[in-house]
Image: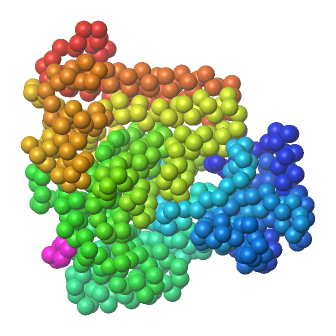
Amino acid sequence: NEDGYDLWLRYRPLDKSAQASVQAQARSIVLPGAATPTTQAALDELQKGLGGLLGRAPAPATRIADGALLLATPARLPELNSNASPLRAELAALGNEGYLLRQTRVQGYNVTLIAANSDIGLLYGTYAWLRDIGTGAKLEASSAPTLQLRLLNHWDNLNRTVERGYSGQSIWDWWALPDIKDQRYTDYARANASLGINGTVLNNVNSKPEVLTAPFIAKAAAIADVLRPYGIKVYLSARWSTPLELKETSTADPLSPEVQAWWKRKADEIYKTIPDFGGFVVKANSEGQPGPQDYHRTHADGANMLAAALAPHKGIVMWRAFVYAPKGTHIGEDRAKQGFDEFKPLDGQFAPNVLVQVKNGAIDFQPREPFHPLFGALKTPVMMEFQITKEYLGFSTDMAYLGTMFEETLQADTMTAAGGRTVAKTLSGIAGVSNIGTDRNWAGSHFDQANWYAFGRMAWNQQAKAKDVAAEWAALTFGADQRVVAPIVKMMMESRETVVNYMTPLGLHHIMGTGHHHGPAPWVDNLERPDWNPVYYHRAGRDGIGFDRTAKGSNALAQYAPEFARQYSDPKTTPEQFLLWFHHLPWDYKMRSGRTLWAELLAHYDKGLADARSLHDQWVALKPLIDARRYTEEEQRLTRQMANALLWRDACIAYFQSVSGLPLPAGVKAPA
Ligand code: GCW
């Protein structure tokens, strides 16, 4: 019975004809030169993978022969680099992490070649080759990542709870570390390397001073040792006030020499234990976290001080732009504006090893947000922060494939250059807030594995299409049978829009339940800070609904490129999916469909519920083709999702009706 532990690395037996053709391409496995931990990982994966797919893995051999699967870098096989080699130029263009897969002749033999410039490239190539076999794709490719930083961010606490985690405890067993290294760490490394993820931040951005003490550095080092062969570097979230709270300095002012010296010593200490440590991510002066502003210094002062400590070791600082102060400042200001307002003026002041890490949208990981105005606005290198865990999209209960959301954001045109410039083109790195936990299936639900997968594949290639990625994942996860893959892809492609429709259609946002963010609460109006209240965001009343972010309102639009601002300042030229994000409109505003805004809103809620029911029915129809355990586990969630969708629809309609005072349009039945 499938429990999901193997993720997309299941390697279940291929059918006989596929086995024969793969066998012909891999009669032996040849790796010229000495094995390293990384090539050993590749060889081990081939043993495991081919062992499963073919029933028996080919033996490693030392001599190239016809039918060999050959893993080679120019250093291992110098002829790849010779002027005569047809692959020389292609290989040179692949950089350190890229790979190519080719049926070709080497030394007069017909071989299947996995070639790269480095051992890590060989490992990535190995996973790509195994993936191609698993999906039945053609085994010819060349691929290299555009971004060097492809990270997971764990919001894992040291007590093993996970902030916004819906899949069990943290996989990092801090108590047992460093002596006891769970097999899960290796399987985690394999899964991430199979996607090309090359860094991981182990702990929550709401961090604790303890994580930077010697015992925890030793624990992090033990994890780093497991991940290193897989090309994954370890990073930590640093709490701004660490030295002060540990009582090792008298202040946390970034300009204090005592503080600067402390961080330098701390960096030296970390690098003694973890020589390839990646660096720090920092959440400062946001939601109660300490930061340089506590000392009247800027985010740049803070980031640069840490950057100076890490620079001699080639470490980096990822300074988060999700900064809104929970108390005091900016009260009454549109929260969507604060990140830009704080960071734009600091552009140009950051040290070269600082990146500003920006959430995909300016509010907070909503089911749909327009891209953050900082993308394309800074010279400072910027990283994307996506949230893989579904804090606002129904946790791990509701099905919502995020590939479509990642694609929508990455391909959005920032209009910050002539001819257009997508968000993807403005990035220097990408991070995803992990959905991984100790649940047997890692992600809480089987379909949430797809969100980890899609993040990784799109971190490698921002041009990847959500639909292709879904098809790959479905084939690897449920078997490469079109009777299964096609309907699953259809469900996945519909799923996120379904959630948007029954939660926050037409640009509504932040109307979820207080604190937990699950379920509807558009009526909440009594929280400590106005910009925590749903009523602050939907602004529904007798006169209409929506947040006016044009020049008549908060003017958040002015933070975008002029062409974008122009298009979105007019409701008629604003895409309807963002209408109420940027505009406050009367209930009888005429929509493109010809319906009134009120009727259109109801239609979206109805569609969300209908589509949630349809997702369930589509899954039920697949029952004969899905193993019993995974079928049942997902069926229960889809049943729960129908109830969630019903609650969302009825609660939102009832609430909005209570403020609009409008009757339900003819043909719409009152909520049961
Ligand atoms: O999305 C919000 C979450 C917080 C989170 C914060 C952040 C880690 O509700 O749980 O804290 O954003 O991104 O810093």
Residue 241 at x, y percent in the picture: 28, 75
- Looking at the picture, does residue 299 appear above or below residue 69? below
- Does the magenta portion include 96? no
Residue 566 at x, y percent in the picture: 20, 45
Q: Quarter holding the N terminus?
A: top right
Residue 36 at x, y percent in the picture: 72, 76
Q: Residue at the spot x=28%, y=32% of the render? A: 576
Q: Quarter holding the C terminus?
A: top left
Q: Quadrant of residue 203?
A: bottom left
Q: Which residues are magenta?
A: 293-299
Q: Residue at the spot x=38%, y=26% of the render? A: 608
Q: Is residue 517 left or right of residue 444?
A: left
Q: Residue at the spot x=34%, y=41% of the render? A: 368
- Does the magenta portion include 294? yes
Q: Is residue 29 left or right of residue 539?
A: right
The single residue placed furthest to the top in the displayed view is: 666
Label tally: 0
Foreground of the two, 417 or 652:
417
